[in-house]
Image (cartoon, rainbow, N blue to C red):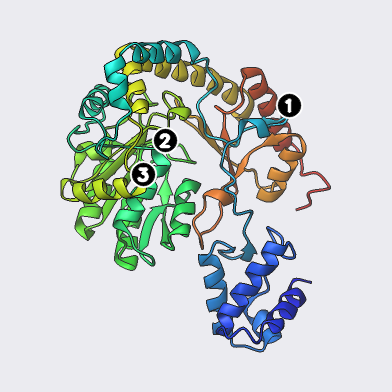
Amino acid sequence: MTIETIQQDFFERCDDGLPKYRRLAETMAHLIESGLLTAGSKLPTHRAMADKLQVTVGTITRAYAEAERRGLVEARVGAGTYVCQSNRPGWVFSYPSQAPDECNFGYNIPPYLDRSAPLAQAMQTLAQQADQLNHLMLYQDPQGLSEHRDVICHWLNRHGILLDPARMHFTSGAQHAIQLVLSVFCRSGDTLLTEQVVYPGFLGLARQMQLNVKAVEMDQQGLIPESLDTACRLYQPRMLYCTPTLQNPTTAVMSRERREAILAVCRRHQVLVIEDDVNGLLPVDAPPPMVNLDSEQVIHFGSLSKCLAPGLRLGYIQVPGKHQDRLNTALHHHCLMISPLLSALACELIHRGDADRLLTAIREDIAQRKLLLDRYLHSYHIQHHAQSFHAWLTLPDNWRLSDFVAAAQAREVIVKSAELFTPPGSTIPQAVRLAISAPHSHDKLEQGLAILAELLAQEPYPDFPL
């Protein structure tokens, strides 16, 4: 049994000189690494563990908190403490890992399009400009070449995102932007607020940097201003991280009025807003991003991954003016600079009009995929948006979350459990995210949706009892 396994290893470490709470955390780390404590295992209650190890309940509380800080376990409200899944993020995409018959709804990636012709033409144009190409191969300022920032900011401005080329920096995608922000503005132990369910990449970085993440209640538009105000007074956070447009995983889009209300709360409590706008270019009629409404209160970042190609690894970030030098220094320390060749390639795609054509093609493809989603799952509680790569499916009462994920996987359909998106200590919704953009073809998408519809309509399999 779990408790006897822990007890034996714990007492074998009596001579390690560590405080008892640290010894127990080390015991759990060793047992997890060795495979004796498996992912998903439920740990004993604090009282049961304290009695077995002959220590105080307070010692167990500190040990479990230390293990959670390291990302080994997670506390689930009303359910107990469980061993986390593998340290390898469950949201990382790998094309070769997909089985031929598998329908993978797991990865929030652009639909598969043939980008070879516009990319080849852009690269050929750059290759014919010898002086410019040589210039791109030199060290540049960490902020990126000014002429490239001018082009990309102008393109973003045309799409309603008002960034200043004098203040914008390039990044290696949006994940790198989050890492930059957290490293510049946060210290270990700081508290950050975020949505009730949130992008797992943010949670992973916050855990790695030993930051405390507290969830704020949401509705159909995203963050609720009154709940945010309460959380600010209760936790005194350093920052708020949110995705106002096509929130991941719920697809919520904040209205302009809601964005202004959220900003007003943050100004009142002197909390900076991290605006993740990675999906901001997808909707044709999105409200203005928060950075447009208050550029001195908002750290804004986005990426060309969703609208052009993930392989470009080109993102962008703008911080309030007073923090510009700090960001520049941090970016230099991270990687010296972002490859000018990548920003030159993006600029060439914009000049030729291919960036807009690719964005239009992605929107049209998603619109067709959404029709299939509506056909098969219209009877169920599902949140989605016309231009969103993903949808958020709340399960019927007869299905338990873990059972549904397992039953779908048994039918070679991969979905992402709400567990991945839930901040530590928060209640896990009985929901899954479906990335309808991920299957390579519409036929494969339809096949997967049909299987999910069959599962939702029936009682759980006997192998997956309630």
Mark closer to the chain start, 1 or 2: 1
Mark closer to the chain start, 3 or 1: 1
* Mark 1 closeness class: few <14, some 14–19, many ≥20 residues within 10 Å: few
Please give the residue where the numbered disc 1 appears in the rendered image: 100
Q: Is residue 54 above or below residue 43?
A: below
Q: Nearer the viewer, mark 1 or mark 2?
A: 1
Q: Secondary structure at mark 2?
A: loop
Amino acid type of the residue that numbered disc 1 sits on in the rendered structure: Pro
How many numbered marks does the figure carry?
3
**127 left or right of 380 in image:** left
Q: Is residue 301 above or below residue 60?
A: above
Q: Nearer the viewer, residue 344 or 450?
A: 344
Q: Nearer the viewer, mark 2 or mark 3?
A: 3
Q: Position of residue 261 (x, y in %)?
A: 25, 47
Q: Is residue 231 above or below residue 219?
A: below
Q: Position of residue 290 (x, y in %)?
A: 26, 40
